[in-house]
Amino acid sequence: MSEETTTPPRPLAPAAERALAEAADRRAEIDRKAAEGKAEKGGRGGLDPARYGDWEIKGLTADF
């Protein structure tokens, strides 16, 4: 039986950590604004398919 040696993941660079934090803040702001909006009457239900600037149906997205 062989022993597996795993190396710990490398720490992220400060710029990468800032970028991830900024992206999370932007997503939270988009989701907050979407939750505040009025519900669509007769819509398809679920989350707004264009909430991130893309159209999404059945897991497929397309920029427009």
Image (cartoon, rainbow, N blue to C red):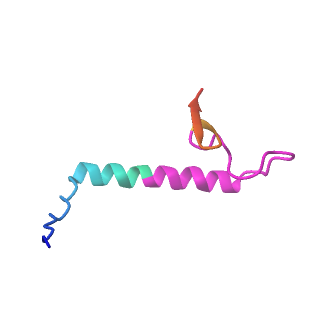
In the image as oriented, which residue stretches furthest toward the front? 1
Quarter of the image containing the N terminus? bottom left
How many labels sit on residues? 0
In the image as oriented, which residue stretches furthest toward the right? 42
Verify whether residue 28 appears in magenta: yes
Nearest the viewer among 17 and 1 is 1
Q: Which residue is drawn at 27% across and 50% down?
A: 16
In the image as oriented, which residue stretches furthest toward the top? 64
Q: Which region of the structure is painted magenta?
A: 24-52
Q: Which residue is drawn at 72% across and 53% down?
A: 46
Q: Is 56 above or below relative to 26?
A: above
Verify whether residue 47 appears in magenta: yes
Q: Which residue is drawn at 58% across and 36% down?
A: 61
Return the x and y of residue 3 as percentages of the image width and height: 13, 71
Q: Is 62 above or below relative to 51?
A: above
Nearest the viewer among 59 and 33 is 59
Return the x and y of residue 41 as percentages of the image width and height: 86, 47
Return the x and y of residue 64 as percentages of the image width and height: 60, 26
Q: Residue at x 81, y 45 (%)?
A: 43
Nearest the viewer among 16 and 5 is 5
Image position of 2 (left or right of 49): left
Image position of 47 (left or right of 40): left
Image position of 48 (left or right of 22): right
